Image: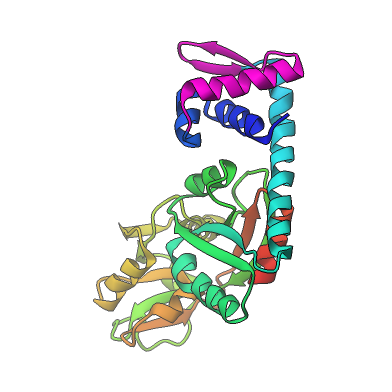
Amino acid sequence: MRIEWLEAFQQTAETKSLTKASEWLHISQPALSKQIRNLEDELGAQLLLRSTVGVTLTTAGQILLERSKRILDEVNALRREIALSHEEGKSVLTIGSWPSIATIYLPGRIAGNQQAESKLEIKVRVFYSFFDLLSNVENGTLDAAFFDDRGVKHSFYTTPAFTERFFLFVHVDHPKYGNKDEVLFDEIQNESFVMLPEGCDVRMLVEQEFTQRGKELNIAIEIELGQSVLGFVHANLGIAILPEIFIIQKKDTIKAIPIADFGTIRQISVITREESVCRQLLGFI
């Protein structure tokens, strides 16, 4: 049984389409069909039911799909471990995360490991929703994702990496909060905020805090990037609730005020398909 046969089968089973799978694997559809037929011949069972609308799994195919995920994860883990053990080898991992983590948190870790001549090479991609992050971990485009996954159902390995508090970001000349060094939730609960869109953990966690207190989160405007949210605050066009990581990017015109009784904490975790990758990244960060 060849690894490429398993990879061809898994991609076809997950996309439910020979056409999509062949495009993803960068091979012709006849070549893909031949690999799957070879796998079926070796196992002595039909794995896929083909139709004009796509493919579905047989009972044997369902069994193989579950096993193939574990087999391929082990093979990929083995490849990485061998690469790391080789004197000149480097293990390359692709990480996906929100813009804030990708542009503020990860660059410092990457630079530190390069100075230490680490055998781990990191590539970073930016995403804007839970669905895209998890989908790309599932299909192997990402080796790992960094975000707060406590409210998201998935079947991957997950380990906490760091935590951070939330702050109220305001212009230093804001008439109500500019002179404050600390605020309470009751003081800000009826304000309208510049907020990140749905699909990111910051928005989910802030809404969670308001919901738990029986309050509605009032949103003045949604902005896709946290840096752009800070731009509105810098222009004194609004206030925002953001996690601690954004303090690094704020200008002198912006004040980050602790919300003393804001109970929600953001917990960034490492989410991976393979436990060995999770261990590698925890050592990296």
- Residue 45 magenta-highlighted: yes
Residue drawn at the location 51% of the way across and 35% of the way down? 25
Q: Is 140 located above or below residue 260 in the figure? A: above
Q: Which residues are magenta?
A: 27-56
Residue 125 at x, y percent in the picture: 46, 58
Residue 166 seen: no
Residue drawn at the location 74% of the way across and 45% of the way down? 74
Residue drawn at the location 61% of the way across and 64% of the way down? 267
Q: Is 234 located above or below residue 158 in the figure? A: below
Number of callouts? 0
* Image quadrant occupied by the N terminus: top right
Q: Is 24 located above or below residue 128 in the figure? A: above
Residue drawn at the location 24% of the way across and 76% of the way down? 235
Asked whether 143 or 85 is in front, the reply is 85
As drawn, the residue found furthest toward the top would be 51
Residue 176 at x, y percent in the picture: 33, 81
* Image quadrant occupied by the C terminus: bottom right
Residue 107 at x, y percent in the picture: 49, 73
Q: Is 154 located above or below residue 25 in the figure? A: below
- Residue 133 magenta-highlighted: no
Residue 165 at x, y percent in the picture: 55, 73
Asked whether 117 or 253 is in front, the reply is 117
Q: Decide if residue 215 is on the left or right side of residue 284.
A: left
Residue 79 seen: yes
Q: Quadrant of residue 181?
A: bottom left
